[in-house]
Amino acid sequence: MPPEVLIGYTESTPKIDVWAVGIMLHALMLGYFPFRSSNRDELKKQIIEKELIIDRKEHKMTDHCYDILVRMLDKDPARRISIPEIMEHPWIVDLRKSKRRRDRGIFGHGEL
């Protein structure tokens, strides 16, 4: 759950979904969740208070990947990246371009 829900915000917004996808992206890219504890109260405290620290060099993370991840996991929903911003983020745009190149194949119009 995002910090705003844990402190009592009850309205559902797309920014809550962005947080959830950010948590999954963190786990996929780094191999672990950003907040971990077997104690529910400690986990809640981490989500609300703990600073997100990612060692880009250790994880061989590009600047664009790092940027989208920390913006998705911004604790302040007003500053958290929006879904339209995600779709135009350089990391996503680069992934789309890369997929289009792969889809065209070596001859530029798909595999023969």
Image (cartoon, rainbow, N blue to C red):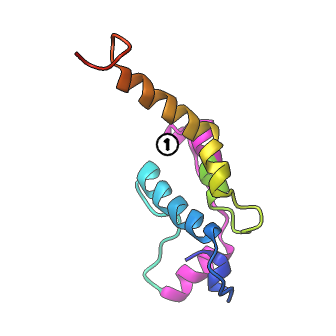
Residue ranking furthest to the top: 107
Residue 97 in the image: above or below residue 13: above
SS for dot 1: helix
Residue 18 in the image: above or below residue 3: above
**Residue hosting label 1:** 59
Q: In this view, does 100 lie to the left or right of 93?
A: left
Residue at figure coordinates x 48%, y 72% from the top left? 36
Q: In this view, does 103 lie to the left or right of 18?
A: left
Q: Horizontal and vertical percent for residue 106?
A: 33, 12
In the picture, the quarter occupied by the N terminus is bottom right
Residue 76 in the image: above or below residue 9: above
For this rendering, which residue is in front, 93 or 43? 93
Q: Is residue 8 left or right of residue 33?
A: right
Start-end of magenta stretch: 40-67
Residue at figure coordinates x 43%, y 22% from the top left? 101
Q: How many marks?
A: 1
For this rendering, which residue is in front, 50 or 79? 79
Q: Amino acid type of disc 1? A: His
Q: Quadrant of residue 82?
A: bottom right
Q: Is 57 covered by the magenta stretch?
A: yes
Overall secondary structure of the magenta section: helix
Q: Horizontal and vertical percent for residue 62?
A: 57, 36
For this rendering, which residue is in front, 80 or 31? 80
Residue ranking furthest to the left: 112
